[in-house]
Image (spheres, helix red, strand yellow):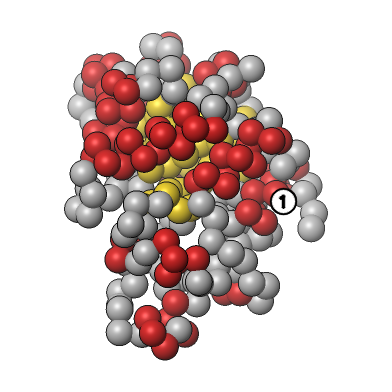
Amino acid sequence: MNFLELLNRTGLIGAHRGARYIAPENTMRSLKVSVGFCDFIEIDVQLSSDGTLIVIHDDTLERTTNVAEIDEFKSRKPYKVSDFSFKELSSLDYGSWFDGHVEPLLTLSETLQFIKENALFLNIEIKDMHTFFSDGQVVSAVLKEIQDWQVQNKVLISSFRHEYLSLCKERLPDVPTAALVQEKHTENLLEYLKTLKVDACNMSNELADKENVSNMRKAGYGVNVYTVNEKTRAKELFEMGVNGIFTDNLDLFSNIKI
């Protein structure tokens, strides 16, 4: 089964940044803990200053690393990810902020190797980096990793920067894409999604209503909703026809334990 076939189903559970209520988000530990308790895993990727794709959500490092404790980095506020080299990023601790246990940097390459070895599905969210890198540079880097690991059938690419999605379809049309939407839907939404050539829409919980979900599903688009941490809301969404939800708390849906 490939990711597009997966998106034909409903009741799907996506591990948002891995099992982030149980392990530090976007680390290998958060991925490993989620295995067997979700239908797919979601991660965020950004480029280091020298072009390596790393797995991290924020565009700054302070919340989820020990960067502010490192003397040589104290003058580099606000600690933007794009200002640090891969070597510098690799020297940081990505886990102690969560539970005191040191965790190393996770790269996209390591993540793709992991999903390939474990036959998992992965939603790669490309963070908006257009102020630091060209769209072509970002998309080329992501697609190269996907091709190098031969996981085209196991991934879904999403982004709030929809220009990335159009480029992905031009360069690797067989890899499914999803438009991320947060505050409001674009006018003539179905036509807009058609112009992007996306396969799905990943919308915020606040935007998900019966009419929009029904219209998108009838038009052939997959619909996934973030971030859903209540069972009652998940039930409502699945009854609307939503394909999948992203959750921080896998324990609510699968009784996952450490």
Q: Is residue 100 left or right of residue 124?
A: right
**Image height of 190 relative to 116, above or below:** above
Q: Position of residue 149 (x, y in %)?
A: 54, 33
Q: The residue under label 1 is which amino acid type?
A: Val
Q: Position of residue 2 (x, y in %)?
A: 58, 19
Q: Position of residue 181 (x, y in %)?
A: 34, 38
Task: Judge by depth and name the residue closer to the eye, 214 or 112.
Answer: 112
Task: Judge by depth and name the residue closer to the eye, 201 or 95.
Answer: 95
Q: Quadrant of residue 194?
A: top left
Q: Is residue 14 left or right of residue 216?
A: right
Question: From where the camera sits, is residue 249 visible?
Answer: no
Quarter of the picture containing the C terminus is bottom right
- Count of marks overlaid on the render: 1
Q: Quadrant of residue 220?
A: top left
The residue sitting at 64% across, 17% down in the picture is: 1
The residue sitting at 46% across, 37% down in the picture is: 145
Dot 1 corresponds to which residue?
Answer: 33
**Image height of 43 relative to 167, above or below:** below
Task: Judge by depth and name the residue closer to the eye, 141 or 93.
Answer: 141
**Image height of 63 relative to 145, above or below:** below
The residue sitting at 39% across, 11% down in the picture is: 219
Q: Quadrant of residue 160?
A: top left
Question: From where the camera sits, is residue 118 visible?
Answer: yes
**Image height of 234 relative to 193, above or below:** below
Q: Secondary structure at mark 1?
A: helix
Q: Is residue 196 left or right of residue 258?
A: left
Q: Position of residue 20 (x, y in %)?
A: 61, 56
